[in-house]
Image (tube, rainbow, N blue to C red):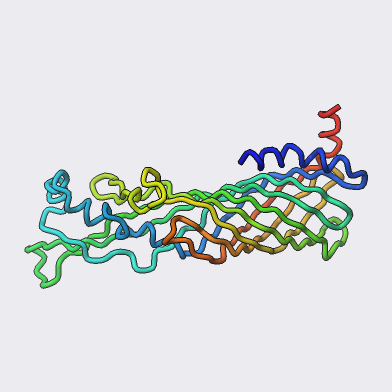
Amino acid sequence: MKKLILFIIVFPSFILAQEKSKLIFGINAGTYLANKNTAGLYDGNVTSYGVSSILNNNNFRQRFLYFFKYPFEISSFPSSIKYNPGTEIGIHIGKEIQNSKIYIDINFAELKIQDVVVIAVNNPNNQSTEPDYEPISLIGKEKRNMINIGYQKNIFKEDNFSLYVPIFFQLINVELKENYVIIDRPYTIDHKSTNFANPRDNPQGYGIGFGSGFVLNYFINKDISFDLGYHGQFSQTNFSEDLKPWGMQNSIFVRLVINGTDYLKKMMN
């Protein structure tokens, strides 16, 4: 992290040393579409203190019997759990030379999972051989931090529009933030025992990746422009030694781009 901060500080100075280059600042926001390779981590049935343990906890048993009214048991866990589209925000710093650019992106994504665990309630009054089936909400929340270091090339330009193709290397950090089931109130599903490297923490870790896509730029004037972009990134989501799959993730974003060369020169003089 210290090396990253040093790089961000030195990078603008390096750009200003290049006579024909232009410093670019950007702020972006968009949608992050994660694959479901690690979504099963949140299904309530992968830890020793999952939904089964919560429902059979003697401290809560009477409360649950009062809530469901009759004897109950778990009927099913989610079979195809997946992430909802998440939010992604970030910053962009680049060095633009003629029709190309080298850049670094620092992006932050928040992901959420919403599914259900189905409970079979043995209601003797339902006049059926089958129990009543009641879904209880299952919630998961996850944070992903991504650093993209890349090169972008212009392939088309007409009037105020330009089309670019980026290629980048990615460093990605993933972290399980919350996982809980809602019955009469939220009950936390404890994942700390699944992280053998550090049992005090929720599952988290660093992975790498690479990607490409396209960026459509609309030029307003010499100081301001807007980007509409798509990034496809093939990355490793590394939660633990037993859960670090590779897969495709997708980002769709808009970005406000500012020419920072003149501003930075004035600030440094």
Choose between 222 and 49: the one closer to the eye: 49
Q: Which quarter of the figure has residue 159?
A: bottom right
Quadrant in the picture for the N terminus: top right
The mark total stands at 0
Q: What residue is shown at x 22% (from left), y 53% (from top)? A: 53
User: Which residue is located at x 86 percent, y 36 percent?
Assistant: 262
Quadrant showing the C terminus: top right
Q: Nearer the viewer, residue 63 or 221?
A: 63
Of residues 114 and 107, the one nearer the viewer is: 107
In the picture, measured across the screen, residue 132 lies left or right of residue 7, that is: left
Q: Nearer the viewer, residue 19 or 222?
A: 19
The residue sitting at the bottom extreme is: 129
Relative to 137, is 224 on the left or the right? right
Could you tell me which residue is drawn at 82 percent across and 61 percent down?
154
Q: Is residue 238 above or below residue 107?
A: below
* Residue 16 in the image, given as x and y percentages of width and height: 86, 40
> How far across and down, in percent of the image, does residue 135 sit?
27, 59
> Among all residues in the image, which is located at the extreme top?
269
Q: Position of residue 21 (x, y in %)?
A: 88, 47
| View extreme (right): residue | 19
Farthest residue to the left: give it.
124
Residue 7 relative to residue 70: left or right? right
Residue 152, horizontal then vertical, whole percent: 77, 58
**In the image: residue 55, left or right of residue 173:** left
